[in-house]
Structures are given as C-alpha cells and as structure tokens.
Amino acid sequence: MSQTNLRIAFAGDRDIAVWVLEFLLQAGVYPEILLVSAPERASHADQLRELCSFLPPERILVGKAFRSEPGIELLSSLQLDYVIGIHFPYIIPESVLAIPKIGVLNLHPAYLPYNRGWHTPSWAILEGTPVGATLHFMDAGVDTGDIVHQKKVPVSPGDTAHTLYRKLKNCELVTFQEAWPSIVSGGYVRQRQQGSAGTEHKRSELFTSEVQEIDLDQVVEAGELLRRLRALTTSQIEEAAYFVENGRRFRVQVTVVEDKDE
C-alpha cells in the first residue's frame, strides 16, 4: 500500500495497538499525534512511543490529557481525518468525537452488537453469544456506532477467556488490515447496529461474588460450572473463580486440552 494523504491521530494500548500501528507505518501512514494510557493503566505505551519517535513531545498526549482544553485545541488544530482507537481505555467525549473530519474509528474485540463494553471473551463463553472483532465508528454510546467491517471467531469447547482473547486479538488485526483499503479509498459501507439487539456489560459486572464464588454445598449442572470456570480463566489469577474453605479463599483456573487423534 502506498503513502496516503490521510491525517490521523492514533490512540491505543495493549499489544494489538502495537501491531496495528506497525501495520499503518509500514503502509506509509504516520500519525500526526499519539494518545497513550497513563502509566498506571498502560501496558504498551513505551512501545507505541518508540514507534512514534518521529513525533515531537508535545504531540504525545498521556492519559486524559486529550480531553483537556489544551488537548482539544491541539487535536482541533491538526485537521485530522480520523482518530483511530485500539483498546484505548478512556471514554472519548463528544467534544473529541466531533474533531476529525470523517470520524473516530474503534477496533473492538467483539462481534457487535454482541458484547459491547468490557471482558468480551468471558461474556461470550458465559452467554454463548457470537464472538469476533469489529471495526466501527464511535458515537456517544458504548460500542454502538456504525460498523465498517467485522469477522467472527469460532469458540472451541476448550477455550478459556485467556485463549479466546488471544484469538480475538489476532482476529482484530486481520479485521483492521482487511478494512484498511476501504478506509483509504472511502469505499466502505457503514452498517447501522440494531439498537435493541445485542448485549452490553460493564467492567464491574463480571468480577462479583455472585459470578466468581463457587458454593461447594450447592449442586450445579456440570456444563454450567465448566462454562463459568472457563470464562473466569484469564491472565489474572485474581479474576478467577474461587471457593471458600475454613475462612480461606482458593482460586480455580482451568486448562482444557483436546485429545489428539491417534
């Protein structure tokens, strides 16, 4: 892909943001400004900064600085076509959504309209909803904007939230790469989401005692229990299911391995 005249801001975190930014740079697209997470929330801010070493320090906004008055003034002065958000963990207010000429694109690890919001692989396993990756325009709602491109990911009976999340990130990259030519040409078709369809979950909904605690005295259907254990097996042990014995809490994570054909 050749150099384009698109003017973009890049806002992101996590390894998937690094992958997408690398793809854009290889395509000859250099962000006018970089938005990264604050240190207490960031995992890959340093890698993103390194990739954007061509930017002057004042063109790198940290944390919520992008929605401060000086941040909004700076973004407004850059004549941006797009803001591209990749796992950027902050709410983007309407004052910022209105800045780019075309819009704010967000890459979400879910097959919208299912699993808007947080912890998408866990809820996909718990509720048996379709799962995948979606590139969509942002609006004032939570993951409710028009869809540009999306792909499904098959869920294996052996998937945990951790293994499914890895699949989703790979799917996100492919989804973005497939959509990018239409973004450059302007030939994409915006697909509206059905307002009454789909599911949405807040960050706080999953990690509660009602979901995480296993009552050892309660009879639970085996399939339901296994789904819950798979959904709560993430990269963080404190997010796992648990049971209480003699006043002490014991965490449970699972590994599910399919037998290989002999």
Image (tube, helix red, strand yellow):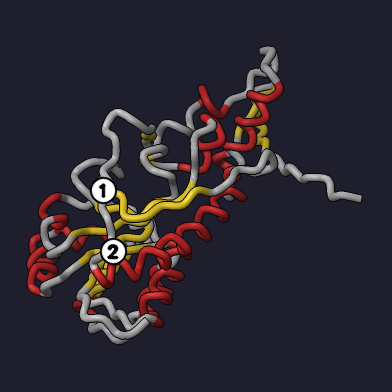
Q: Are marks 1 and 2 in contact (CB under 8 Å)?
A: no
Say if 98 sits above or below 241 in the image: below
Farthest residue, direction right: 262
Which label lies toward us, 1 or 2? Answer: 1
* Quarter of the N terminus within the rendering: bottom left
Farthest residue, direction top: 218
Say if 21 sits above or below 167 in the image: below
Q: Residues within 10 Å of mark 2 (few under 14, many from 20)?
A: many
- Residue 211 x %, y %: 53, 26
Q: Amino acid at mark 1?
A: Asp
- Residue 166 x %, y %: 56, 55
Q: Residue at x 28, y 67 (%)?
A: 183
Question: 233 left or right of 56?
Answer: right
Q: Amino acid at mark 2?
A: Ile
Which residue, given by chain and number where applicable, does mark 1 sit on? 146
- Residue 171 x %, y %: 50, 57
Q: How many marks?
A: 2
> Marks 1/2: CA distance?
14 Å
- Quadrant of the rendered structure where residue 204 is? top left
Question: 109 left or right of 226?
Answer: left
Q: Nearer the viewer, residue 98 or 133?
A: 133
Which residue, given by chain and number where applicable, does mark 2 sit on? 84
Q: Residue at x 19, y 59 (%)?
A: 103
Instruction: Note whether residue 234 is visible.
Output: no
